[in-house]
Image (cartoon, rainbow, N blue to C red):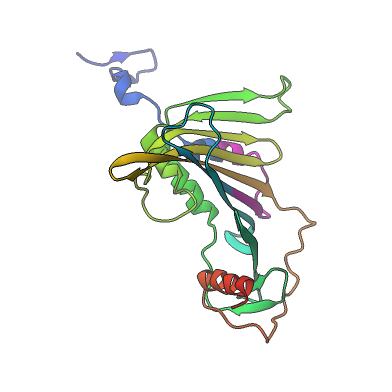
């Protein structure tokens, strides 16, 4: 059968099945729609907060029993990005029973500098691969969204936009690698639950939570459950004229020259332990 003609002399092909034309939404598309509301040309300030809480519960415990132990660790990154490059960064790592580690990275005069716990700056031989806005968006493009619920906090449109994204388990595994390179694999522990929410006003945020279940065995019998709950909060805010990024960073000749970011963390741990 020939295609129908609708008055304009243009042939209209037969409609394909719904399965072949069903639109596909990705987390990256939602993220870009929200980010387009911001003036990002001068640069962005990116904040990343990661928190992990592990509760250890005896396997035979009754419902409502207090966990036998709780372990927590966290990581925070405050990044200043201009022209696709991180020019300032403050990185903070903490854990239960351990002193918090804080290091700073600054780009000055075309070279990288590091600082530990507010001390002076030492030289860094290699530029650390801290964060790439474009690569981050591309990784979010690989995360398909099954459905999304969009809510406006105020009827006049002046409030915060909140997008609750429904993501399948396999797709969520891709999101867990959004801040790193390489291909995503299956979580080491079974994924119990997960969620992802984007929002926007004067900033754009991405929050996602997930929980995992680990089971320890003694002589082949269940001994305890390790319930791991994790949360990542990422925020993106345009730079303003008040952000002073061009001030020089003097090098302290008494500090060692380190190769990379791993060497900085190792040096910070040794400084903390006094070794």
Q: Is residue 141 visible?
A: yes
Nearer to us in this view, 248 or 37: 248
Q: Give the residue furthest to the left.
A: 1
| 261 versus 134 height, above or below | below
- Between 65 and 73, the residue placed more toward the observer is 65
Q: Which residues are drawn in magenta?
A: 33-49
Q: Is residue 253 left or right of residue 275?
A: right
Q: Residue at x 34, y 44 (%)?
A: 217
- Image x and y of residue 25, in percent: 44, 32
> Percent from the top left, x then y, of residue 14?
28, 17
Please give the name of the residue rendered at 52% of the width and 73% of the height, measured from the top-left corner: 263
Rendering coords of residue 134 (x, y %): 51, 52
Q: Can the viewer see residue 91?
A: no
> Considering only vertical position in the picture, is 196 above or below 269?
above
The residue depicted at 66 percent of the width and 24 percent of the height is 152
User: Image quadrant for the C terminus?
Assistant: bottom right
**x 46%, y 48%: residue:** 138
- Is residue 223 toward the left or the right of residue 265 in the image? left
Identify the image quadrant of residue 1.
Answer: top left
Q: Residue 177: image x %, image y %? A: 44, 49
Membership of 159 in magenta stretch: no
């Amino acid at each position: 059968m020939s295609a129908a003609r609708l008055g304009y002399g243009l042939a209209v092909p037969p409609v394909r099945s719904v399965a072949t034309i069903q639109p596909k939404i990705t987390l990256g598309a939602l993220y870009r729609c929200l980010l387009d509301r911001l003036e990002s040309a001068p640069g962005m300030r990116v904040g990343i907060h990661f928190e992990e809480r592990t509760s250890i519960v005896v396997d035979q415990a009754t419902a409502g029993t207090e966990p036998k132990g709780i372990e927590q660790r966290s990581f925070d990154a405050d990044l200043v990005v201009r022209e696709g490059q991180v020019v300032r960064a403050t990185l903070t790592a903490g854990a239960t029973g351990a002193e918090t580690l804080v290091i700073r990275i600054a780009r000055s005069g075309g070279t990288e500098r590091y600082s530990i716990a507010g001390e002076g700056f030492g030289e860094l031989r290699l530029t650390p691969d801290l964060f790439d806005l474009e690569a981050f968006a591309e990784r979010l493009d690989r995360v398909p969204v099954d459905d999304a619920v969009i809510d406006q906090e105020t009827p006049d449109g002046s409030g915060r936009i909140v997008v609750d994204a429904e993501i399948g388990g396999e797709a969520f595994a891709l999101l867990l690698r959004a801040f790193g390179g390489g291909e995503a694999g299956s979580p080491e522990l079974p994924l119990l639950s997960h969620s992802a929410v984007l929002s926007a006003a004067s900033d754009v945020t991405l929050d996602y939570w997930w929980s995992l279940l680990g089971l320890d065995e003694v002589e082949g019998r269940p001994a305890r459950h390790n319930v791991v709950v994790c949360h990542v909060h990422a925020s993106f805010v345009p730079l303003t004229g008040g952000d002073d990024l061009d001030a020089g960073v003097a090098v302290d000749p008494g500090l060692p020259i380190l190769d990379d970011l791993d060497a900085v963390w190792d040096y910070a741990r040794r400084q903390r332990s006094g070794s």
